[in-house]
Image (cartoon, rainbow, N blue to C red):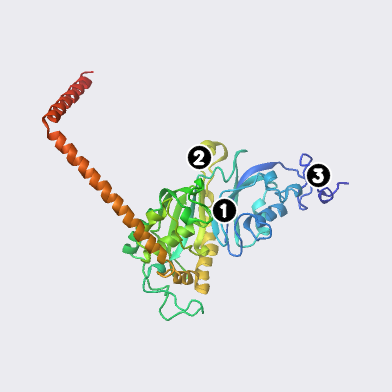
Amino acid sequence: METPAESHPEEPTSKKLKTSPSYKTPKYKRRKIALFFGYCGAGYQGMQKNIGAKTIEADLEEALYLSAAIPEQDRGHPKRLDWSRSARTDKGVSAVCQVVSGSFYIDPPGLIERLHRHLSSQFRVFGYKRVAPSFSAQRFCDRRRYVYLLPVFVFDLRRVLSNCESGNVVEGECDVDRFCYGEEEKERFNRILKCYEGTHNFHNFTTRIKAEDPSSQRFIVSFSASDTVVVDGIEFVKCQVVGQSFMLHQIRKLIGFAVLVMRNIVPESLIKIALQKDVNITVPTAPEVGLFLDECFFTSYNKKWKEVHGELSMKDYEKEAEEFKMKHIYSHIALTERKDRVVGLWLQSLNHENYSELSVASSSKIANLKDSEVRRTTNDKSSELEIAADLKSPEAKVTTDALALKLKTAEVEVVVD
């Protein structure tokens, strides 16, 4: 008679593995796969497992175990599973396309249906794809795209939530239905976001990382906010940022600082100053509810392995992912704003009083930059005048003529050859 797996907790992994109670014998081989799924981050303390905290990974791993994809011996041991995530998400942050890779039992058929039986409606597993044995969702992810839904009323300088501490809303204040995100606002906001593109030192846009730390250097491919979407009567600006990787709270701080500039609390010139290594300033952090991971890209991997394992992307799941996004993520963001006025309350903290030191830092730094620019320009002009004077001399005329003749001769020689 077969002994239950639970009676041998110390059984070596080299022995025949026992699976969860649903399937007592591992009749199938493990396969290296990339699992595509989405989730609403409400009520979760983030993606990555953390003892004592409710996390996305913990619930997913438990569902995989109950679905017989993970054997009892390897439950709670991510290294044995070769577990890897393509991106982190912080507390309350959602994802339309998250990818986890690992070695799992995918047979018998019906793994996705089994997973959904053990996951809440906040999750949606779209599917999985076989990958190369060396694949890691984290290491092979070239770029990540995040989206932040920002209510358009944040750009309305006339409207700010009053009496935020008591929770009362002054009539006409923070009206989500009236302000229009027009061409002027769109042009200016996109110009501000474009300042973040490229490689910069983002130490002011994260926490617990110093400017000298090499990890503060990050590359942002693109940052734009051209489209709007109306959800539950609230119009949102869709802010899309694509980068290689992001630090803790980085995107939320980038959005927060951009809003600070749009509301004319600090000058636009302060953005480039904030990206300098020798400048330390306090940057506001936008609420987490509007942020979600939109897609992960595996460009380099696909170039090498596409013909063997197929393309690793969301193309096969686009329709299902869009439906999940609208039903569970967009609606959650709009409902939270309607109910709790999260962005409206945060907007109240964005004022000259709370960020007065930014204006002082900006004025001082700009003055130094202007002095430096004046000195550089003056030196350049002096050099130009000296060169011009030298060129007018007889010696310079002879040298110039000789050089022109030499170039002309060389040109003829090239034509002859």
**Callout 2 amino acid:** Ser
Q: Name the residue rendered at 45%, 54% in the picture.
A: 241
Query: Which quadrant does the C terminus fall into?
Result: top left
**Callout 1 amino acid:** Arg
Label 3 sits on residue: 11
| Mark identifier at residue 390 | none
**Callout 3 amino acid:** Glu
Label 2 sits on residue: 300
Q: Is tag 3's residue or tag 1's residue first in the polypeptide sequence?
A: 3
Mark 3 and mark 2: Cα distance apart in space: 39 Å
- In front: mark 3 or mark 2? 3
Mark 1 and mark 2: Cα distance apart in space: 20 Å
- In front: mark 1 or mark 2? 1
Classify mark 2: helix, strand or loop: helix
394 or 186, which is in the foreground? 394
Instruction: Give the image location of residue 55, x and y in percent.
Output: 63, 58
Instruction: Give the image location of residue 271, x and y in percent.
Output: 38, 56
Looking at this rendering, what residue extends furthest in the left direction? 394
Image check: 224 left or right of 386?
right
Q: Is tag 1's residue or tag 2's residue first in the polypeptide sequence?
A: 1
Instruction: Give the image location of residue 298, x and y in percent.
Output: 52, 44
- Quadrant of res 188: bottom left
Q: Is residue 233 visible?
A: no
Label 1 sits on residue: 88
